[in-house]
Amino acid sequence: HGRGGRHSSTDPTNPHHCMHMPLLPLHASPALLASSSPEAETARWMVARSDWGYVTTLTDGAPSAAVLSLSDSACSDAACHSGRLFFYIATSVAASQPGASSLADADSGCNASLTLSQAALNRSTGCEAAALDPEDPRCTKLTLSGRLARTQGPATALGRAALFARHPQMRRWPASHGFEVFELRPADVWMIDFYGGGAHIPPGEYYAATPRHNVPPSAASTAATAATTATAAAAAADADAADLSPL
């Protein structure tokens, strides 16, 4: 079992993973009342720290994926992060954008999954700092699956402000490409950050959590040992080089 005690027997990378899940009603507020958990806090931390991810959809029954920039907040303060998943997608050229070809007429939305990896974060918070391979279970991986659709009403302005704050270049993207704000409303949140399998996080619990990186104690100890070993190895190599250098 994962550290949350909720073992996942479903592969979230399977493109059919979100096809039969109950979806959150579009009128429901993301700020659903729920208690949070360490897993939910880490999931929110991953979203708050991530600038981009892989979005997977089904096009004519075949899986396709696109690297898309994302944002959940218009400011960097932890209290500002909403956990809502906003994207800026070109609709007029959707056919030439892998993974987004089914979005041009997506007013009603389509099933999609967003996958994030801690390995994609910067060196101070990513897996490189802990000397972990991206495929190592201790290198956090998060998949949020649900409905991806154009935003409506106030959500459009909210999403645009969040995206433009984190990705200023978007302001200058050509209007002729028909960029529009989309939001992924997760019905399933799956995360793994240690040995023993991943955990499913209820969407309400995900939204209720405060972004925080909760490292399992045993994982923190392992990472610290790996970092110490790497530092010692580097120091030994420097010492050997100094001994071999000419006087």
Image (cartoon, rainbow, N blue to C red):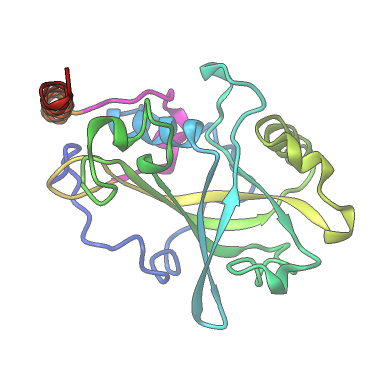
Compared with 223, 77 (above or below) is: above
Looking at the rendering, which quadrant does residue 154 occupy? top right
What residue is rendered at 24% in x and 27% in y? 215
What residue is rendered at 36% in x and 68% in y? 14
Compared with 56, 171 (above or below) is: above
Dividing the image into 4 quarters, which one contains the C terminus?
top left
What residue is rendered at 64% in x and 21% in y? 75
Front residue of 213 and 134? 134
- Left or right relative to 201: residue 166: right
Q: Which residue is the extreme one toward the right?
A: 176
Q: Is residue 33 visible?
A: no
- x then y, percent, for residue 238: 18, 24
Front residue of 36 and 227? 227
Q: Which residue is the extreme one toward the front?
A: 247
Looking at the rendering, which quadrant does residue 31 occupy? top right
Q: Which residues are magenta?
A: 200-215
164 is within the stretch colored magenta: no
